[in-house]
Amino acid sequence: MSISGRGIVARAAGAPLTVEELVIESPGAGEVLVQILASGVCHTDLHIVNRFASDESPFLLGHEGTGIVLEVGPGVTNPKVGDKVILAWRAPCGKCRFCLIGQPHLCANSLNAERRMHTKDGRTPQPALGIGTFCTHTVVAAGQAIPIPSSAPAAQTCLIGCGVMTGVGAVMYSAGVRPGSTVAVFGCGGVGANVIQAARIANARKIIAVDLADNKLEWAKTFGATDTVNPKNGDVVEQIKKLTDGHGVDYSFECIGLPNTLLQALLCRDLAGTCVLIGVPGAGPVLELPMQAFFDIGGSLRVSWYGDCLPSRDFPMLTDWYTKGVLQLDELVTREITLDEVGEAFLAMERGETLRSVIVFPEN
């Protein structure tokens, strides 16, 4: 059995995006069919469009999604038909070398469904990050569909699936920010805003937001930034040290993926401070590191991949935090759009006008 749907398939790098008709097959063993209710428009999808998409290897875009389980494949007991779920682009296999030693967040064989969506001309597009949420329906591995309460709103909770979890997890798990500590966040877009609010939740006493865009620095304050730094106003490291009695911060987070901002994040730390790289550099950028300066400060440089999270544990927890007013999600949704407006949403993102545009799909 198959159903008809609509989704955005990227067929050529940098080409205009169009909505295509799709045929979606029933889920196979260990898989579920999900009707998408909402999907966040993330910068990673723009990277896919600009760098990887081609007619030989088309992509079904989207990887932040909340939906309803419509059908389950053989052997699936969780989730169940009718469950509201947040989709995760990582789902531990339970069998690899990392899962077997109790580190499932590092799973080397993350579960994904078979490609079960087809275009009218017979292509089988690759779902972005194994999910594909810029679509009315998608098929994922059962372990990628994490149940949440039916009352949780889709437009907000879909963001937990990537940007929120990445930022919050970097603070909670990758860095382990301590109460009373100082933090600097480089890049205050969709991920950086969540690093800021997670540092606030962790009771950091000073949270310094760093960005070239004044509107993003203003947004940062709404999530808990105590101070802001704009590189246009002078040397970033000096500005941060001035705000920390000359010492530097205990934790710095680079959310952009650029060598110069990573170097600044490394050099703005206090003695033995921790720097966490979250931004995705892509192929090409090279960091020229003054090794003696790095050695003199000590501490560590860490890479945070998906916030070192475990979706089955963390997605329900963050949903609960939102319900209780601890985690700010409403403020992340800058615009609600339709599937046909995704191209404009990417342009708005590039212009720095949004934290997140969210595609909201009709429920029927």
Image (cartoon, rainbow, N blue to C red):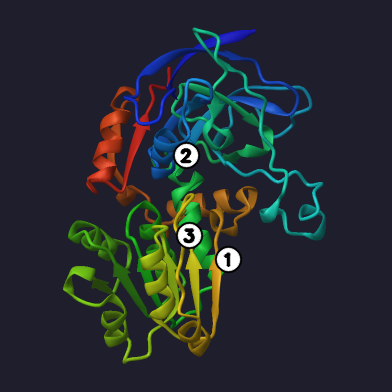
Give the Cα distance between marks 1 and 3.
Answer: 13 Å
Residue to which mark 2 is pinned: 64
Circles 3 and 2: CB distance less than 8 Å?
no
> For the point 19% across and 57% down, which residue is it?
215
- The disc labelled 3 sits on which kind of residue? Ile
- Residue 237 in the image: x percent, y percent? 32, 79
> For the point 68% across and 38% down, which residue is it?
143
Residue to which mark 3 is pinned: 278
- The disc labelled 2 sits on which kind of residue? Glu
Relative horizontal placement of residue 23, taking residue 215 as reference (left or right)? right
Q: Is residue 230 visible?
A: no
Relative horizontal placement of residue 175, taking residue 186 as reference (left or right)? right
- The disc labelled 1 sits on which kind of residue? Tyr
Give the Cα distance between marks 1 and 2.
Answer: 21 Å
Viewer-nearest of labels 1 and 3? 3
- Tell me the number on the disc at residue 173: 1
Q: Which quadrant is the C terminus positioned in?
A: top left
| Between discs 1 and 3, the one toward the N terminus | 1
